[in-house]
Image (tube, rainbow, N blue to C red):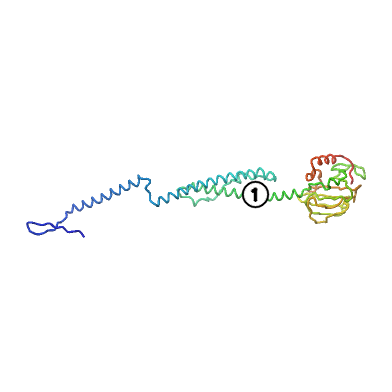
Amino acid sequence: MSKVKYYYDAQTLSYRKIKPKRGRKIGLFLLSLLGIFLSGFLLLLAYINIPSLETPKERELRREIAQLELQYDLLNKKMDEAEVVLDQLAQRDNNLYRTYFETNPIPDEQRKAGFGGVNRYRNLEGFDHTELLRSTNERLDVLTKQIVVQSRSLDEIARMAATKEKLLEAIPAIQPVNNEDLTRMASGFGYRRDPFTKARKFHYGMDFTAPRGTPIYATGDGVVKRADNRSTGFGNHIRIDHGFGYVSIYAHLFKYNVRRGQRVKRGDLIGFVGSTGRSEAPHLHYEIHKDGRRINPINFYYGNLTPEEYAKMLALSQQENQSLD
């Protein structure tokens, strides 16, 4: 409630109310309004021209943005490192592992392919940094796909390694009779004179002369398919199926040390030298078959012969002499 003011009227000898002029009221109002406007304008100028002046909310947002930029830089560095590691692993995979296991390399188009068709990043559109978000997500997706491709490749290589290990264990790779037990290597693979007809015919194995009862060893891992005397000319003989298309035959035995269906390891004692069947003297007739075809056993003695011993045996096996069966 405004305060009422009076003045003394000397003519009427009484007090009268002082009535404020209307124009003055309006002037005071306008003056106040102008002061408020000028104060607001000056404060706005000060806010715009003083960078360090920021609200607590702005300060918090600025810290979050700086942290996000730091995390983004770290993410990019990690992706760079992951791409380098994956490239190196892919090179070893194609040029070393797959070369060793004789399998086709994985093409770069398959390793680094993107994702076609449907727009996978539609939910990232409409933001201030849409392109940044899209490219980062796409790069992460490609990296993830490369890791999956490489992981599957390594699983395949692990399976091939296991198969390769079994193959190396199965291949007939040692001499079936120890060198110290041999009298001599009597005859090799190729044309030889038949001991009975004296005719020249092809000899499909190698003959190792040794005293009757000399131990005979399995030349590779496998399963005994036959241990009998029901094959013409072989007498008592053993056949071992090594898998991977390999079969070894041991003929003219004195007796067996294995039975049909038995699983054997390379170096296991399987029988003893004899002279049964079509044989002129105690010896072991040894053959190797690969995929049903008889091949030269001389190429498979890398497991227990020195280079000098192998060279000597190779020279003897090439002599066209008389076989013992």
> Of all residues shown, which one is farthest toward the bottom?
1
Q: Position of residue 276 (x, y in %)?
A: 90, 51
Q: Position of residue 70 (x, y in %)?
A: 48, 47
**Closer to the camera in the image, 43 or 324:** 43
Label 1 environment density (alpha carbons within 10 Å; few <14, some 14–19, many ≥20): some
The residue sitting at 56% across, 45% down in the picture is 81
Q: Position of residue 96 (x, y in %)?
A: 67, 43
Which quarter of the figure has residue 95? top right
Q: Position of residue 37 (x, y in %)?
A: 28, 49
On the rendered structure, is 33 left or right of 68? left
**Closer to the camera in the image, 291 or 305:** 305
Mark 1 secondary-structure assignment: helix
Which quarter of the figure has residue 196? top right
**Closer to the camera in the image, 232 or 8:** 8
On the rendered structure, is 118 left or right of 263? left
Question: Does residue 202 appear in the picture of this structure?
Answer: no
Could you tell me which quadrant the N terminus lies in?
bottom left
Task: Please name the amino acid that badge 1 sits on.
Answer: Leu
> Of all residues shown, which one is farthest toward the front?
180
**Closer to the camera in the image, 247 or 89:** 89
Question: Does residue 6 appear in the picture of this structure?
Answer: yes
| Residue on which the image places disc 1 | 154
Q: How many marks?
A: 1
The residue sitting at 90% across, 42% down in the picture is 322
